[in-house]
Image (cartoon, helix red, strand yellow):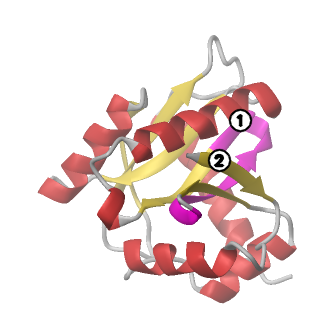
Amino acid sequence: MRFETYDRLEERIWPEARRLYHQAFPEGRKPDGIIEAMFARKLSLLHIGETDGLVAAMAITGVIRPANALLIDYLAVRPDRQGEGLGTAFVEAMKTWAKDEQGLDGLILEAESDPTPANERRIRFWRRCGFIATAYVHQYIWVPEPYRAMYLPFGEAPNLPRDGEALFRHIGAFHRRSFRKP
């Protein structure tokens, strides 16, 4: 798998990555206009994993400077390629990029925490990738489902909070910046 990171919505890559984004997140995703504004304001990065010339995995992330961490906002693997280890390899490539190329202290994300089979499967995936789930469950006012923060520290990671509430302060600030009008 070829791993690439873009700080803009590359014309050659974004249409295919956007199709995967829409397919993986049919509901509850950020609208395309918000995603485009996030990239225009340099809030986000697009990571892609290509196999056989096709986008097999994609992620939209943002660097959280106060935590010195990369927030995984969205990550998707093509349905016909799931179960092949591509998701794990893709997360490993993001981890290597964040640590070795960006000097970050870790990765963070939020996962839906309702005890459904799909959510539990996703949390197992993140745990297999090395993420640690926090005990704190966050309830946003604008979406009905509760979320749990997860983190993956690189070594001691002195700036990376381990507390769910502290992580959600960073995650919430990222979302507020994402939806803020320019």
Residue at 15%, 52% (x, y): give it.
115
Tell me the kind of residue under disc 1: Trp
SS under mark 2: strand
Q: State whether residue 104 appears in this view.
A: yes
Label 1, label 2: how many angstroms apart (C-alpha)? Answer: 9 Å
Pick whichever, 130 or 11, lies toward us: 11
Q: Which residue is mark 1?
A: 97
* Vertical arrangement, residue 66 with respect to residue 122, above or below: above
Range drawn in magenta = 53-70
Secondary structure found at label 1: helix
The three-letter code of the residue at mark 2 reads: Phe
Is residue 80 depicted above or below 2 in this figure?
below
Give the labeled residue for mark 2: 3
Q: Residue furthest top?
A: 156
Q: Are marks 1 and 2 in contact (CB under 8 Å)?
A: yes
Which quadrant would residue 62 be assigned to in this image?
Answer: bottom right
Q: Quadrant of residue 131?
A: top left
